[in-house]
Image: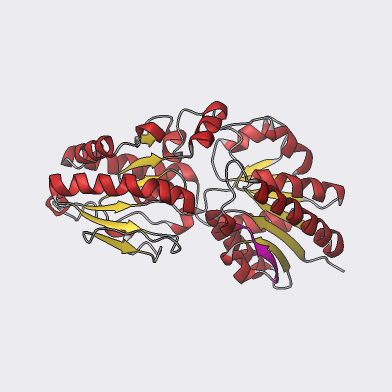
Amino acid sequence: MVNDKIFISVGDLSGDIHAANVIKEIKNINQNCHVIALGGNNLKCVSDYFIEDIVNINAFGLLSLKQILYFKRLLKKVSSILSIERPSKIILVDYYGFHIHIARLAKKLNIPVFYYISPQVWASRSSRIKKLAKTVKKMLVILPFEEAVYKQNGVDAVFVGHPLIDKIMQKNDFNNKPFSALNPPLIGLFPGSRIQAIKRHIPILLETAKILKEKINAQFIMFCVNSDISYNLPDYIKVDISNDFTQRKLIDFAVCPSGTVSLENALMGIPMAIIYKLPYLNYFFFRAIIKVKYITMVNILSSKNVVPEFIQFNANPKKISEYVLSQLKPKNYMSKVEELLLFRQMLGQPGVSKRVAEIILND
């Protein structure tokens, strides 16, 4: 009898979306597939047995004692489920800190592990590659250079393309929209998706918007993913909570954190300024271990400062607003749009989720 059980785990919001798309494709190929999932709301909707939500607990960086105890309990629960259910395959999506333990459990049970969306081992703690090599059957990587990084370390890896290619279409009005329409410009403000990051970024965004409002009477939209926080915005800042890109396509410029939102904006061709601020202890910890020059994917893949990064002490509203003003000059603006749209070609071909599903089911 064929074992059609698959266990999948994901720990963050963007990964939850990509994981759910892969499961949809798996079920399209094999309708008898029984999916056991640990993740968030998107994965919950497409799984047959959902264990619990680990996406919305915001466990990133240095964990508290309470969070450590939570994950120890959860790992024990997962161990029991894997031993009883004996899935034929395990899919892990990013989130190294917890997933390496699941990978080790799978190794003991002789269950093959497919790791989709690599942890950024090339950015810090490269010793993790050797640990992954001992436990993972195949790495399904979404950045072109990652395939070689893993293969050089004895890990079977394949570049499948970036899943955002299927989701994000570029803006199509750059050539049709007269530049005078940018006066006043519509600026998107993005505080992030994690509660603690939002609380740190909101004051920076509000002060930046205030400066720009005074200088060029700009218009603003705040894109709010997390509805649990009261933003207390001035009346000249509109709010969008839909996250469906309808309003995003209208903005001329973005001030946003690094991560998924910056990659989405880059793929759409929207010029931007990157901000990021961490708790001081976390900042100095990550600064000590980070090995890459940039933290924003468009800069990392381009090996140059395509979009400026205003990080920690440099996340100054005056500096940010000065950059925004300089980029809104017609020549600078269209040059940046063209540069961002060229970047899109580096991330692979469409059909990523289906490609991932086929590799997992056929390998």
Q: Which span of residues is magenta-colored?
A: 48-54
Does any portion of residue 130 appear in the rendered image? yes
Residue displayed at 42% across by 51% down? 198
Q: Is residue 52 magenta?
A: yes
Image quarter for residue 74? Answer: bottom right
Q: Does residue 314 appear left or right of residue 213 in this picture? A: right
Q: Is residue 118 magenta?
A: no
Image quarter for residue 226? Answer: bottom left
Percent x, y of residue 132: 72, 39
- By secondary structure, the bulk of the magenta-drawn segment is best described as strand
Residue displayed at 57% across by 59% down? 56
Percent x, y of residue 238: 27, 62
Residue displayed at 22% across by 42% down? 333
Residue lying at the far front in this picture: please name it.
65
Q: Is 195 drawn above or below residue 34 in the view shown?
A: above
Residue closer to the observer: 90 or 40: 40
Q: Is 302 drawn above or below residue 107 in the view shown?
A: above
